[in-house]
Image: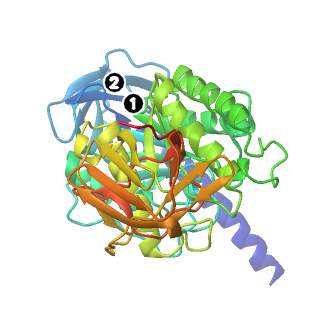
Amino acid sequence: MKLSFKLSIILALLLQNVAMAAKLEEMEILYPVRYVVFQRETPMDGTVRIRGHYPKTAKIERIEARFCEREWQVLDPKPKDGAFTGSLHEKVGQGKLEVRTKGDTELVAEVQCVGIGDVFVITGQSNADGRGDAHIILEQNNPFTGTKYRKNTWSRGDDPSANDGDHGSAWPMVLNELIPDQKIPIGYIQAAVGSTVVKQWRKGGSMYTRMLAIVTSATDGNMKVRAVLYYQGENDITHHNKLSVLGNYNEYVENLMAAATDFHNDLKCPMLIGQITNLASERDRNDNIRRGQQYAWANHPDVLPGAVAYDILPTDGVHYRDEMNMRAYARRWTMALLSSVYGQKDFVNPKLNQAELLDANTVHLVFDRKLKIETWNGKGGNKAFGFRFKDNTVVLTDQDVISTAISDKEVTVRLGKPVKPGVLMSYGSGKDGQGQPILRDTISDQPVCMVFEKPLVKP
């Protein structure tokens, strides 16, 4: 038995050596691997960067390549020492990449499902990484296969898609909506980590350093992506991370603005910053983080609005876990991408343009889009929730709102108690409006932008 075991080990080693020797006699494409998406450079085309090796003993004049069974092109006119590199400038698409030698030795190699399209880097906390219970599979009728880079490997963009565990995330759902709409290959690079804080996402921070390493590996050092998607802030409300800003507005803004600059400097792309939902009962801390996110949208040249989720009630109070929750959250990211990246203005969040106090009990609001009253999961309502009025020490809440009448873009709010000119109005503050019928866009269902202590004046 002992002899038989030793012989089996020797045989296995011999077979391994034979396999390695055979591999050395083959041509191999080292990059791209299957499911890689290259970031396009214009709406119509991009560059496929290729490297690989072939047997040093082979007599080769040149290396040629083709993408999606189009015309063969010279990839490397003078390969040497068993290695080749080169690039193809090609139209947007997805398919087979083929490489062949020309000369006395003829060798071929291929990689399936390589794409040219858009690539997004996912950053932030656990809701960006994903904590979903359901696993979503890509739709078969999508014109292209969505892909992901997760745990050092490119693969199809299906769930599981979280780095931490085998959870589902929003991103397969986003792929299922974006790919048919944009008609391009789309991939995402998963770099988010749960329980992180904004200071860790600045240059020199542990998460930022990790993110750069992940993007370097995913792109083979090319570093070209369409945008960074950032959803973070919950842990900057709590004390669980020692680097938390603990809801300090100025400190959060300083670090978030610096992080956006760092991302742009290294990746040369915009950053879409999502606005988090309410966490626990810390109204002021929640509002400071979300005000900071709005500040970045308005004041940083390379920041765009991401998903707005203040009205969605998370499954466990923090995470989007059940499928309905996750679909609502994913839809917000889809709409943010359609508006911020792809220029479809029907998907922007309605903004407050005018706020007046007509009399002591009547508030008149004017938004930039037509509105309706509805919950995040489609249930209608006769009165909009989410209001808060602060007049010195007096605070009026939704229970003090008698009615909200909508006429196109205008809203008339009737209060049960009188207020004075200069009263401060907020909308969506803390958990106000969370899970309730609120003001939202009639076309896209997007919630109106949060409002923080807007003074109401006489017309």
Image point (33%, 36%), residue name? 341
Quarter of the image where one finds residue 304 = top left
Name the residue beneath numbered marker 1.
50
User: Mark 2, residues whose alpha carbon is within 10 Å: few (<14), some, or many (≥20)?
Assistant: some
Pick the residue in front: 251 or 109: 251
Determine whether 88 is above or below 112 in the image: above
Name the quarter where the C terminus is drawn.
top left
Sequence-wise, the earlier of marks 2 and 1 is 1
Q: What number is the disc on residue 213?
A: none
Q: In the figure, is residue 25 to the left or right of 258? A: left
Image point (31%, 44%), residue name? 367
Name the residue beneath numbered marker 2.
87
Distance of mark 2 from mark 1, alpha carbons?
6 Å
Q: Where is residue 450 in the image (x, y as percent from the top left)?
A: 47, 48
Name the quarter where the N terminus is drawn.
bottom right
Image point (70%, 31%), residue name? 250
Determine whether 74 is above or below 238 in the image: above
Q: Do the residues labelled 2 and 1 touch (CB within 8 Å)?
A: yes
Residue 13 seen by the camera: yes
Q: Residue furthest top?
A: 78
Task: Kindly identify the amino acid type of the residue bearing the numbered disc 1.
Answer: Ile
Task: Kindly identify the amino acid type of the residue bearing the numbered disc 2.
Answer: Ser
Q: Is mark 2 on a helix, strand or loop?
A: strand
Q: Where is residue 420 in the image (x, y as percent from the top left)?
A: 52, 46
Quarter of the image where one finds residue 43 = top left
Q: Position of residue 143 (x, y in %)?
A: 19, 55
Image point (42%, 47%), residue name? 449
Q: Where is residue 189 in the image (x, y as percent from the top left)?
A: 49, 45
